[in-house]
Image (cartoon, rainbow, N blue to C red):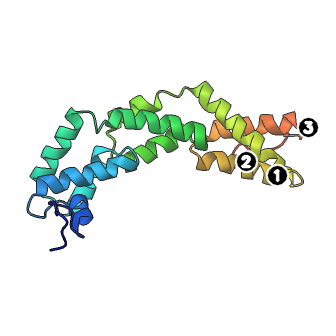
Amino acid sequence: MTGRTEWPGDGPDSSRAEKEPSPQDPAERARAICLRLLTGTPRTRKQLADALRKREIPDDVAEEILSRFEDVGLIDDAAFAGAWVESRHHGRGLARRALARELRTKGVEPALIQEAVDQLDSEQEETTARELVDRKLRATRGLDRDKRLRRLAGMLARKGYPEGMALRVVRQALEAEGESTDGLDESF
């Protein structure tokens, strides 16, 4: 004996024991997994369910834990979707269509997706499209008009903007720069 009183959990394996609950209790493991995943970033119920399934937590135990987490507000797909739309629209300039696609891949229910993307109106979306085009416009100077149109409209299309809006915004930006848009195709 070293003369030092050892307390339970003081041994060299104590940190590992705190991180991973005993494999005998799937509910404790599920709780720990969910808490660890929610620590870094908000997640949807489906993302957590997938993580629990991957770690072989029984479905009934996973359902119980996920329902409890929803009841206490640790999982809120509606709040997640709203924050996602706000963040990705302002940060990346994504349009409603692209945001809805991303939320679907995260397992958010269609009604919640619709509610979240309805936060953005057409005017907001068009303003963001104009800002994106203005930022990219300088990099296309020196290229011929058709190539500029394709690049700028293509950039907006990849971000989920409707074709009509993308073409209108790009044409207006090119015209404001003094570029003639006569004879441009109606589609890219």
At label 1, which amino acid type do we have? Thr
Q: Identify residue type, mark 2.
A: Leu
* Type of amino acid at the residue the image marks with label 3: Gly
Local crowd size for mark 1, using a 10 Å CA cut-off: few (<14), some (14–19), many (≥20): some
Q: Is residue 124 visible?
A: yes
Q: Is residue 26 left or right of residue 73?
A: left
- 170 or 100: nearer the viewer: 100
Mark 2 secondary-structure assignment: helix
Pick the quarter of the image with the N terminus.
bottom left
On the image, the x and y values in percent for residue 106 come to: 37, 48
Q: Residue at x 89, y 41 (%)?
A: 179
Labels 3 and 2 touching (C-beta < 8 A): no
Residue behind mark 1? 140
- Residue at (84, 49) in percent of width and height: 145
Asked if marks 1 and 2 touch (Cβ < 8 Å), the reply is yes
The residues tagged by marks 1 and 3 sit, at their Cα atoms, a distance apart of: 14 Å
Residue 152 is marked as: 2
SS category of the residue bearing label 3:
loop
Query: Does residue 29 lie above or below 124 as drawn?
Result: below
Task: Determine which quarter of the picture holds residue 73.
Answer: top left
> In which quarter of the view is residue 94 placed?
top right
Q: Which element carries disc 1, helix, strand or loop?
A: helix
Badge 3 is on which residue? 178
- Report if residue 168 is visible in the image: no
Observer-nearest of 51 and 147: 51
